[in-house]
Image (cartoon, helix red, strand yellow):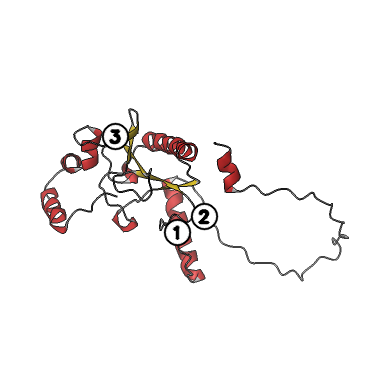
Amino acid sequence: MTEQPTEAQIKEMQEKMKNMSPEEIKELQKQQCVFCQIIEDKVASKKIYEDDKCLAILDINPANPGHLLLMPKEHHPLMPLIPEDILGHMSMVSKALSQAMLTSIGAEGTDIFIANGSAAGQRAQHFMIHIIPRKPADGVPLDIPVNKFKKKEIDDIKDLIIEKVNALFKLNKEVVKEQPKVSKKVENKETKQPKKKAATKTKKKEVGLDDIANLFK
């Protein structure tokens, strides 16, 4: 993993940025970004993949051996600032890199994630996609906890998100409300039909993640 900037470095950058234009701020961030220097071959790295839009390198402090960092060649600190065509291209590249891990180094799965913002654990000021090969019981702590919240709190958050999504996608839709559940005891006797005997179905074999992974071997 990359090292987090010190408090003194953060304060120094904040002071410089107070009287700068957005273009000057972006250029300053680019000059101080170690990943931009890697992209420009000013800093050595272990490159795995490169094209005109993005670069994938091995993380020098990996969560697991083979941990990749896929980044755009243009300096973009956060995901909302990346052009859609670049983000779409990186998505396809991350898919191919994940498949390569399943067929080359014996990975049985991959974690593909984005830390978008410091609150989400982002340490570098350059957007990147993490691709981590996984094996059972490898000890990588990426399990998502299951927490319980009140129904009203969840409903309020749902309405706020849907409202913003509709605005972003320019959708003229009302926020969907949950329909009340109909009691099973209420029946219309006139339309009630005799139950038909269910047809016997042949039990199908369940397909697991291991079966899917085997398709790429």
Residue indicated by mark 3: 73
Q: Earlier in the sequence, mark 3 or mark 1?
A: 3
Q: Is residue 55 above or below residue 20?
A: above
Q: Is residue 42 left or right of residue 88?
A: left
56 and 182: which one is in front? 56
Residue 124 image position (x, y, % from top left): 26, 48
At mark 3, the secondary structure is loop
Residue indicated by mark 2: 174
137 and 146: which one is in front? 137
Q: Residue at x 46, y 50 (%)?
A: 166
Q: Is residue 27 left or right of residue 150?
A: left
Which of discs 2 and 1 lies nearer the camera? The answer is 1
Q: Give the amino acid type for the residue marked by disc 3 in the picture.
A: Lys
Q: Quadrant of residue 36?
A: top left
For the C terminus, the image quarter is top right
Residue 170 image position (x, y, % from top left): 45, 45
Q: Residue at x 64, y 47 (%)?
A: 207
Q: Is residue 152 above or below residue 60?
A: below
Residue 182 image position (x, y, % from top left): 69, 67
Q: Give the amino acid type for the residue marked by disc 2 in the picture.
A: Glu
At mark 2, the secondary structure is loop
Q: Residue at x 55, y 57 (%)?
A: 176
Q: Earlier in the sequence, mark 2 or mark 3?
A: 3
Residue indicated by mark 1: 143
Q: Residues within 10 Å of mark 1 (few under 14, many from 20)?
A: few
